[in-house]
Amino acid sequence: MRAASAAGLEEVTKCWNGLAALRAQQLNSGIDISWEAVLVPVLESLLVDADVTRVLDVGCGTGHLADRMSARCGAIVAVDLSGASIELAKRQFGNVANVEFHVMAMDRVRSLGSFTAAYANMSLNDTPTLREDLTAIAATLSRNSVFAFTAPHPCFWPQYWGYADEPWFDYSKEIAISGPFRITNDQQSVLESLHFHRPLSAYFGALRGAGFSLECFLEPEPSAELPSEYRSRWNYPRFIAVGCRRL
C-alpha cells in the first residue's frame, strides 16, 4: 500500500472499471467471506425497520447486493461511477424486475427522484467527495428515512493492511491510498484499488453536516460458524457499520 499521487473521481472510476470483472467473479464464486457473512448481514440488520418502498443503492458495483436486497425491497435504484461495473450488473441482474442500474455520480442522483431509504456497502471509502456525496444522498431521502453504510474500520484497517507505521500515514488526516485489491481468499490479484482513509470524526462530522442523526454504530465480527482459519485473522474489527436517519 502507498499514498496515491492522484485521487479524483476520474481515477476512482478508472480503478473500478479495471476491477469490475474480478469483483463479479469473486462474488459469483462466493469466495468473499467478508461480503457474504459479515457485511451483507449487518446491513440487512440496520435496514430491518426501514421503509424500503424505494431504496437507493450507493456505489452498487456489479449489482450483487442490489439483487440480494431486491427480495425485501419494493424497488431499488442502484448507481455507480463505473460503467464497466454497471454493464456487468445489467448483464447478470437486468431481469430483476424491481431493480434498475445507472452510471451516475452522486451530484446527479437527485434526478432519479426521492427515496424512502438508502444504503452504501464499502463505497463511501472510495469517494474523494464524502461530504458532497452524503449531502446528495440526504437530499433524495424523505424525512426520518434510514441510511445505512459499511466502511473499513479506520482505526484498524491500516494495521490489517500493514501501512499504519508508514511515514506517510497519519490517522487524523484524509489520505488517498493505492494498492492491490485483495480479499481473504484471493491474495493473488495485482489489480490496483484506490480508497480513502478518514478518521471516525470525519465520517461523523460529514453525516451531521448532511443532516443525519446517528442511531447505531457497530463493529461487526465474524460468527463462530465461520471457518476458524478466517476468524483467526480477526484480531480486531475490520469494518464499521453505521445506521442513521435523515432529520
Image (cartoon, rainbow, N blue to C red):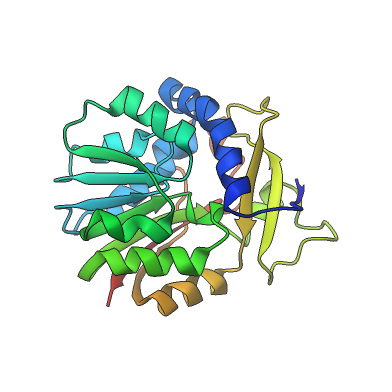
Give above or below for 206 relative to 4: below
Residue 157 in the image: x percent, y percent? Answer: 63, 53
Q: Percent x, y for residue 86?
A: 40, 34
Q: Residue at x 26, y 39 (%)?
A: 100
Q: How many marks?
A: 0
Of residue 158 and residue 202, the one placed in the foreground of this image is 202
Is 223 above or below relative to 28? below
Can residue 13 be seen by looking at this rendering?
yes
- Is residue 77 found left or right of 37 in the rendered image? left
Which quarter of the rendering shows the N terminus? top right
Which of the 4 image quarters holds residue 171? bottom right
Residue in the foreground of this view, choosing between 27 and 219: 27
The quadrant in which residue 40 appears is top left
Q: Position of residue 29 (x, y in %)?
A: 44, 20
Q: Furthest residue to the right? A: 167
Image point (69%, 70%), residue name: 173
Image quarter where the C terminus lies is bottom left
Q: Position of residue 121 (x, y in %)?
A: 42, 48
- Left or right of residue 187, residue 108 in this image: left
- 193 sits to left or right of 112: right
**Viewer-proximal residue among 87 and 49:** 87
- Vertical arrangement, residue 114 with respect to residue 60, above or below: below
- The residue that appears at 42% across and 78% down in the rendered structure is 208
